[in-house]
Image: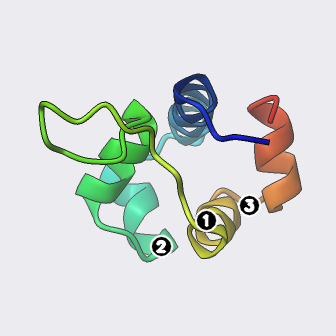
Amino acid sequence: MTWTNEDATRLGDTLRALRKQRGLTQEGLAYPAGLTKNSLQLLEAGRGSGRKDSTSPSNPRMATLTSLAGALGMSVSQLLSKADL
């Protein structure tokens, strides 16, 4: 499977929705997941880079997905399932 902009957007939208359901700020999720707030902002936006001219999709590593899922109280498979990935 090739990771697309649509996949990145779905994951980002899912992360944002799960974070808000739990009453967390971006910082409140990023810190326990071991990420910077900026990294989480990019993931939620589905963007691989903060550069305005960049069109590359976010492509998080398994370690990042594991950390985020753990901070949200779920498994990586549950997180990906919620994003329909």
Q: Which residue is mark 3?
A: 73
Frontmost residue, 72 versus 59: 59
Tell me what residue is drawn at x 57 percent, y 40 percent. 15
Tell whether label 1 touches label 2 (CB within 8 Å): yes
Q: Residue furthest front?
A: 2
Give the alpha-carbon distance from disc 2 to disc 1, as whole Å.
6 Å
**Residue 80 position in % (x across, y down):** 78, 44
In the displayed structure, does residue 80 sit left or right of residue 55?
right
User: Callout 3, which amino acid?
Assistant: Gly
Local packing at callout 1 (Cα closer than 10 Å; few below 14, some 14-19, many 20+) is some
Tell me what residue is drawn at x 52 percent, y 35 percent. 12
Q: Is residue 30 visible?
A: yes
**Residue 39 position in % (x across, y down):** 32, 57
Q: Which residue is mark 1?
A: 71
Q: Is residue 25 visible?
A: no
**Residue 58 position in % (x across, y down):** 45, 45
Tell me what residue is drawn at x 53 percent, y 41 percent. 19
Give the alpha-carbon distance from disc 3 to disc 2, as whole Å.
11 Å
Q: As displayed, is residue 73 above or below residue 43?
A: below
In the displayed structure, does residue 80 sit left or right of residue 30?
right
Tell me what residue is drawn at x 13 percent, y 42 percent. 51
Frontmost residue, 6 versus 23: 6
User: Callout 2, which amino acid?
Assistant: Pro
**Residue 35 position in % (x across, y down):** 38, 69
Local packing at callout 3 (Cα closer than 10 Å; few below 14, some 14-19, many 20+) is few
Upstream in the sequence, badge 3 or badge 2? 2
Q: Which residue is mark 2?
A: 32
State the quadrant of the C terminus.
top right
